[in-house]
Amino acid sequence: MRPLDHPLDHPPDHPRDRSLDRLLDRLVDRARVAALVDARLAPRGVAPEAGVRFGRVVEIGPTLVRATLPGVGFGDLCRLEPSGIDAEVVAVDGDAALLSPFAEPRGIAAGSAVRALGRPHRIAVGDFLLGRVVDGLGRPLDDGPAIPADAARIDLDRAAPGPLARAVIDTPLPLGVRAIDGVLTCGRGQRIGIFAAAGGGKSTLLGMICDGSLADVTVLALIGERGREVREFLERVLTPQARARAVVVVSTSDRPALERLKAAYAATAIAEHFRDQGRDVLLMMDSLTRFARAAREIGLAAGEKPAAGSYPPSFFARLPRLLERAGPAATGSITGLYTVLVEGDDMNEPVADEARSILDGHIVLSRKLAQANHYPAIDVGASVSRVMSQIVDARHRDLAARLRRLDAVYRDIELLVRVGEYQPGRDPEADDALARRDAIRRFLCQPVTEKTTFEQTIDQLWTTVDGQR
C-alpha cells in the first residue's frame, strides 16, 4: 500500500481524471451497459422497467438480507423475487446493501433477484381510514372495504415542521380525565410521555382519553403488543363512539422489526394528513419503548455499535425526528401522547431519559397507587405539564398548585397518621391537607365510564381545595 502523499494521489477533479472520463464517454455507452446489466440480473419473464435496478441476494440472516445492488439509496424500497416480499435498505456499503424485509424472508435463497424500486414506502391516507384498523404498512387488518385505488399516498418518514413554522401552544385540549385536565392540563399540539411499569393501568387511561378527548381525530398506534391485548383493547376499552373517529395502527410483537418500526412512522404520517386538513389530531403511541426495541434490533443487526443501554446511535437520531413531527401547525395540530415502559420506578433508563428530555411534559403512573385501587394511577407529584402555565388562567393555575401542595404535605405526614402519632393543631397546612385528603382522592380517582367536562373539572377542583371541608 503506497503512502497517502504518493505522487499518483490527486483530487477527484484532477485534469487527468476529467480527460479519462471524456474518453470513456466516447468509447462506452454507460446507460446501455447499465441496462444490459439490469437485463441480465432481472428474473426470467420479468422485463426491466425504466428506472428500476436489479441485484442479487448474497446472504440471508434471521433479520436482514444482504444483496449486491448498485446505485441503491438508504431508505429505498426493494422487492425480493420471486416471493414478492418488500424490504427497505437500512445500510449501504459500496455496491452492497443490507435489506430489512417487511415479512419473514421465506422462499428467498442466495442468488434470488432483488428489484430496487427507487422510492420509499408510501401509505394511502384519507377519511376512509376513520374507524379502520391497519397494520404498520397501512394495509387493512379488519373486514372493511379495500383501500380506494385512487387514494392519495404519502411517505412515512417526513421532515418535522421548522421551529418558525410552528404555532404557539396557547389553547387547552380537554382529555376528559380530571387529574390531567385539572392539574396537568394538556395544550393543543403538546407532546407528553406517559411513563408506567407493567400493570400501571396505561391501557385503561388511553381508553379513557380516546373516549373523552375533544380532538377531531384520534390516531392510535399499538406497537409490539400481544395480539390478545389488541383485541381486548379494541372491543372492551374503546367505545364505539371513540372508534368511529379513530384510526388504529397495529403491529403486534410477532411482526418483523421493520414493520414494528414503521408502525410509529405510519401513525405519525396519518396524523399529519389530518392535521394538514386543519383538524386537531390526538396521536397516541403505545409504546415508544417497543419502537426503540425494534430500532435496536435493526441497528445492531446492521452492524452498529451499541451505545447507552445497548441502543445503537441511530436510535438516538430517530427518536427526536419522530417526536418533533407532532405539534401545532399553522392549520391544525397534533397532540402526542407516548407511553414509555419503565422497570419498577426507574425513570433514568435510556429510552425514558431521552424521551423525557424531548417531550413537553410527562405523566407518571404509579404501581403503588394502582395496587391501592387508585385509578387512573397518576402520581401528580411526579408529573408535570410544561405548557400548563401558558394555557390556563390564573385561577386555574393557583387551584392546581394548591392541590399539588396539599398532596405533597399529606405524603409527608402520612406515616405519622397511619401509626397514630400525628398531633392536630401544630401545623395548620398539615391539618388542612389531612382534612381534604378524601376529597382530593375523590377528585383524582375517576371511573372509566365517568365523563367530566373541562368546566366541571375546574369547578370540582375549586370545591376540592378551596370549598368547605
Image (cartoon, rainbow, N blue to C red):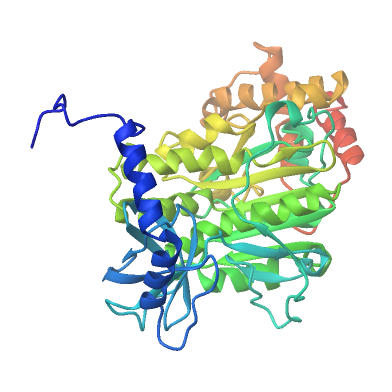
Residue visible at 36% across and 77% down? 40
Observer able to see residue 332? yes
Residue visible at 84% across and 23% down? 466
Query: In this orientation, which residue lies closer to the viewer: 112 or 18?
Result: 18
Is the N terminus in the top left, top right, bottom left or bottom right quadrant? Answer: top left
Q: Residue furthest bottom?
A: 45
Query: In this orientation, which residue lies closer to the viewer: 37 or 467?
Result: 37
Instruction: Give x and y (percent) for residue 462.
Output: 86, 28
Left or right: 380, with 10 as reference point = right
Left or right: 35, with 96 as reference point = right
In terms of image quadrants, where is residue 248? bottom right
Left or right: 384, with 89 as reference point = right
Instruction: Give x and y (percent) for residue 369.
Output: 57, 44
Does residue 18 lie above or below 371 as drawn?
Answer: above
Q: How many marks?
A: 0
Q: Residue furthest left?
A: 1
Residue visible at 33% across and 72% down? 56
Is the C terminus in the top left, top right, bottom left or bottom right quadrant? Answer: top right
Observer able to see residue 365? no
Query: In this orientation, which residue lies closer to the viewer: 48 or 274?
Result: 48
Instruction: Give x and y (percent) for residue 357.
Output: 53, 29
Does residue 158 lie above or below 229 as drawn?
Answer: above
Instruction: Give x and y (percent) for residue 408.
Output: 62, 24
Residue visible at 85% across and 18% down? 394
